[in-house]
Image (tube, rainbow, N blue to C red):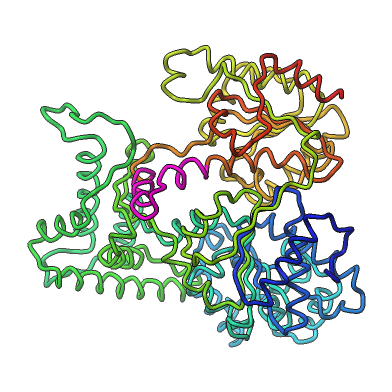
Amino acid sequence: MNLFPYKARKNQIAVMQTIKRILNDKETIIFESGTGSGKTICTLSSTLEHALENNKKIVYTTRTNAQQRQVILELREIRNKNEKLKDEIFGVGIQGRSNMCIMARNNPDFSKGTSEELSKLCSSLKKKTKNNEEEGCPFYSSFLNKEKTDRTKQWFKENLPTAEEFIDYCEKKKICPYEINKTLMRESRIVVVPYIYVFDLMIRNMLFDNLAVPEQDMILIVDEAHNLPDYIRDLYSAKLTAYMLNNCILEAEKYGDPSMLNGLTTITKFCKMLDEIICDFRDTYVYGILENGIRTGGVKNNDAFIPSQEFEIEILSRLKITSKKLHDIISDLMAYGEKIQEYREKEGKLPRSYLHKLGLFLDFWMSVEMDQYAKLVVDVAGGNNPRIEAFCLDPSVGTEILRYFHSTIHMSGTLEPLEEYRDSIGLSEDTELVCYPSPFSKKNRKILFTSDVTTKYDEILKDDRVMDRMTNYVANICNIFPRNTMVFFPSFSVMSNFRRNEDICSINRCTFFEEQSMSQVALMDLVSDFKEQSNGDGAALFSVMGGRISEGMDFPAEELEIAVIVGIPYPKPTARQRGLQRYYDLKFRKGWEYTVEAPTARKLLQSIGRLIRDENDKGVAVILDRRATRFKKYIGDLEESKNLVEDIKRFMCR
C-alpha cells in the first residue's frame, strides 16, 4: 500500500491487503471487483511492493493491447509518486512481432505471419545483417550500434512509454523496438504481455529466457480473467479448411508435386482427396444425408459432430493403406514443408508453408485426447470453405504452468460464479475466491429493460414489428438525448442488419461504427473521436458485446452517459456449444450455468460497466430484450420501463 498513488477507497484497501497476504503465503487468488473499481492499480501497487521487497518479477497478462496500455499508464503514476524508487519501478509492454517489428508493420505479407514464421524470418534477416548483406534489416543494424541502442534504452527508462509510443519512437529513430525490448526485459521489474506469451509453450520459453529468472520467482497476474478459458480453448484447438487445402495444392504446383507411398499418390492428389472428404462430411453431418437430391436432415446449424476416428478411417479406406503409412505421409508433408520454408526464407519472403501446417494438423488430429476435445465439421463462407476442427473443451490442458509461479492473481469485473472459472482452468479447490462489492452508489446508475422486444430468432420471424420497434428505440434514444451514447450488439452480423435499417439511418447525431477487422490503431482513433464529441451534442458509437471496446476501456464522465444493449448475447446453439455444455455437465453437473448463463451475464455486465468509472459518474443502461429478467440475480437493480424516453429523462435530469 506504500506505493499506491491515489487516495484509496475502502474496497481498494481490502483488495491490497488480501493480495499482500496471498503473496506472502505463495498462494493463488481469484477475485471479482466491479468495473471501474481500480483493480489494475490495486493489484499493480501491492504486487510491485512485494516484488521489490522479495526480488521477484511480475508477468502481467492482458487480452487486448488497450488493457496493456492502461497498465503502463498506472505504472507511470506509481513511479511519479515514488521518486526515490524511480530506477527500480521499471516495466515494459511487450507485443508480438507483427506489431513490434517495423518491417512487418510496413509489409502486408510479413504482417500476416505467425509468431513462428516471423521468428524464422527475423533470424534470417539478422544473419544477413551481421554478414553485411543488402537484404538485411536496417532496424536491426541500428540496434547493433551500441551508442544508438543505449540512447534508446535511456529514453525508455526516462519516459516509461506504452508499447505503441515506443514503437513510434523507434520507427522515427529507425531502430528495432522488438530487440531493444528483449534487452530491457532483463532489467524490468514487470513485463506486460498478451496471454499468448504465457500460455503458448514456444513463446513462453522465449519470454522466460529473456526474463532470466525461474518461474518460482515470478508473480503472474491475469487481467480480465473471464476471457482466459475461451482464449485457451481457441489456442489449443486446430482446424483444417478447404481454403488451406487449396493453398497446399497451389504450393505443391509451384514448388514441385512429389509422389508419396512409392507413387501411389502425389501431394496434390492427397490434398484434393482430403477436400473431398471434408465436403462429404459437411453434406452428411451438417446438411443431412441426401436422398434423391433432397436433404433429409435440413440445415439447422452450420456445424456438426463427427465420429472421433472417421477422418482417419476415410483416408485409410480411400488410399487402401495402414495407419503406419498415413504417419509416413504426415512425416513427408512436414519434411517437404520445411524445405519450402527454407527456400522462401532465402528469397527474403515469409517462411510459410501450408504443406508443413497440414502435416502438423494431421499429426495433432490423430493424437488428441477425445475426453478433452470434440471433433467437428463446420460449414462457413456460404459453403465455400468447409472445415474440420478439433475443438478444445477443457482449457486446463494449457494451464499446467500456473502451478509453478510464486503466486497467481486472477481478476475481473465480471467473474461470477468464481467456482466456474476456478474449475475451468484447473485450479485447486482451496484457491481463495473473493467478490468485492462495487464502491459506487447505485443511485448514480439506472438499468432499464423493455418487454416488448427481443432478439430471439424465432420470435423475430413470427413478428417483423419486433425489429422495427427495436431500431425505433435505438434511433429515438440517440436523437432525443444530446449525450454520448454507446449501442452494443450481440454480434457484428446483428449490428450489420441494424445498420441497414432506415431508422438507424435517421439518427441525426455523429455516428461511429466498430468494424470487425479494424486494426488496433484505427480502433483507438475511432474511440478517441467518439470521446471528443462529448464536448458538443454527443455522438453514437455502435459496437459489440464481448469486443475490444466493451472491455477494458474507460469512458469517464460525459464521454459515455447512455449504454443501449440490443438483445441478450446468448451463445449460438451450435454443435460446438452443445459439446461444451455436455462436457461441463459431465464434469461439474453445471453445463447450462457454466457455458450459457455465466458467459452471457458477463458480456452484459461488461457493457454496462463502461458507464460508471468513478464516484461522480452517472449513466443509464437500457437492455432491449424482455429476457433480461433472467439475469436479475446478476443485475440486482434491473427495472422494467413502460416508457423508455420518459424514464431516461427523469433520471438524467435528477
Q: How many circles with numbers are drawn on the protein?
A: 0
Q: Residue at x 64, y 59 (%)?
A: 223
Residue in front for this viewpoint, 20 or 572: 20
Q: Say if the magenta span includes residue 482.
A: no
Q: Is residue 640 left or right of residue 39?
A: left
Vertical placement of residue 550 versus 235, above or below: above
Q: Main secondary structure of the magenta part?
A: helix
Vertical placement of residue 535 versus 148, above or below: above
Q: Residue furthest left?
A: 320
Q: Residue at x 66, y 67 (%)?
A: 60
Q: Say if the magenta span includes residue 592.
A: yes
Q: Residue at x 56, y 28 (%)?
A: 629
Vertical placement of residue 101 versus 406, above or below: above
Residue in front for this viewpoint, 21 or 385: 21
Q: Is residue 81 left or right of residue 108?
A: right
What percent of the width, then of the height, locates residue 271? 24, 57
Say whether residue 624 is visible: yes
The boundaries of the magenta stretch are 577-599
Residue in front for this viewpoint, 496 or 457: 457
Vertical placement of residue 52 versus 325, above or below: below
What percent of the width, then of the height, locates residue 501? 58, 19
